[in-house]
Amino acid sequence: MVIFMKKSMQLYIHIPFCVKKCAYCDFLSFAADEKIQDAYIAALQKELDFYGSKYSDRYISTIFIGGGTPSWLNEGSMASIMDCVYRNFEVATDAEITIECNPGTVSDAKFIVYKEIGINRLSIGLQSANDEELKILGRIHTFEQFLRTYDKARHHGFYNINVDLMSALPGQSPEGFISSLKKVVRLKPEHISAYSLIIEEGTPFYDKYQKDVKLREAGCKTTMLPTEEEEYQTTKWTQELLQEKGYHWYEISNFAKPGKECRHNIGYWKRADYLGVGLGAASLIDNVRYANTRDIYAYIDCPEKATLQERMYGWNAVESREVLSRDAQMEEFMFLGLRMIDGFHREEFEKSFGVAIEGVYGTELKRLQQEELLLQKEGRIRLTEKGIDVSNYALSQFLLS
Ligand code: SF4
């Protein structure tokens, strides 16, 4: 008897709509009226239909609905998107299905529907438990609204919740961040992501704090942004506090109660195949990277404009396609694999590339070990704590070109 085994694939669904743009945000997100939202959802469903038949030899292991603010969509729209997913793909019965939510945008009715359509993980964007800081960030909610959303989620039976927090905010001290963190820890979420604010070009924050960024880069005192020493202190305190409270530190910026690590993100770090649908979404399938158009009107129009020939080669919202060279695959393997605190097993490298890791990175591994930035133990290779502190430097050693 021949047993046909389907390969797995992760699915990312991008919902680019937000009530209002936050002052620091450079994600592909914006406010849009209902007409645009409906047209977008119709195009998204056509894209799902297309890939459903193209990848009928795959099953979906995890789904992540991100944005934007997916929880801003009404429950009917979200149900129709997931209905389309189930119609087109075989979704594993134990699939982790996450939706990103913003406080103040989720009602009881939405949580009820989320449960019905199989969503089993929530990722709530809080960023800070300090209302002043939330205002500076341009967030649409207060801490109190977050608490109400969180309670409602628990009430509706969600027991896999991530809370996003952001440090290095203008005017924030390490103590200030830790005070936010403690308020969140008291709620016992299963997962906490703690990222540092990055001032991105093209955002209102960039115009406002550009001078500070340059001063900080030059090692000078800044007026508003935390210094590098303060950022370092915040990071150390965060790692200590969360581990003390029983969270498993499993990736540079991510902490989870044992068994609640985000499977979807681990898939990214392990370079699992993923299909991204929606505006600007990226995919990595069989070492080919695709990216959809970032133009909402082009995306909405594409189902009508697609010719049969274009559809034979791919969805015509795809704007770029890059076949990753072997060197690029190896670099990615190292950059992403070493983001995980446990690193990876040397056999995983060998299995992926057919050569022992020493054959490619022998000199670099040896050097980083001598510098006490990297550790090899029982076949596993990982950064040391010192290596994580200077991860940009450590990871840059694995560039091949
Ligand atoms: S809610 Fe998130 S995606 Fe939307 S503008 Fe704010 S940071 Fe960006």
Image (cartoon, helix red, strand yellow):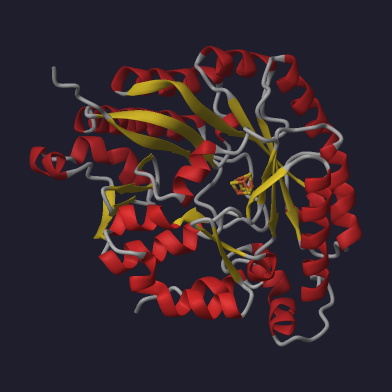
Q: Position of residue 255 (x, y in %)?
A: 69, 45
Comparing 157 with 279, the one in front is: 157
Residue at position x 41%, y 62% from top?
332
Which residue reaches farthest left?
A: 309
* Residue 219 visible within the image: yes
Judge whether 189 appears above or below 376 on screen.
Answer: above
Seen in the image, is 143 located left or right of residue 358? right
Q: How many marks?
A: 0
Identify the image quadrant of residue 141: top right
Give the percent coordinates (x, y) of residue 170.
80, 64
Q: Is residue 278 left or right of residue 147?
A: left
Please name whichever residue, 189 or 223, is drawn nearer the observer in this view of the structure.
189
Q: Residue at x 41, y 30 (%)?
A: 61
Q: In the picture, which quadrant includes the N terminus?
A: top left
Confirm whether residue 169 shows in the render.
Answer: no
Question: Relative to 220, is 271 on the left or the right?
Answer: left
Residue 109: image quadrant is: top right
Instruction: Return the residue nearer the eye: 234 or 54.
Output: 234
Residue 334 percent across, percent down from the top left? 45, 63
At 48% across and 51% down in the image, what residue appears? Answer: 269
Q: 13 or 205, which lies in front?
A: 13
Q: Quadrant of residue 160?
A: top right
Rendered position, 202 above or below 166? below
Q: Residue furthest front?
A: 378
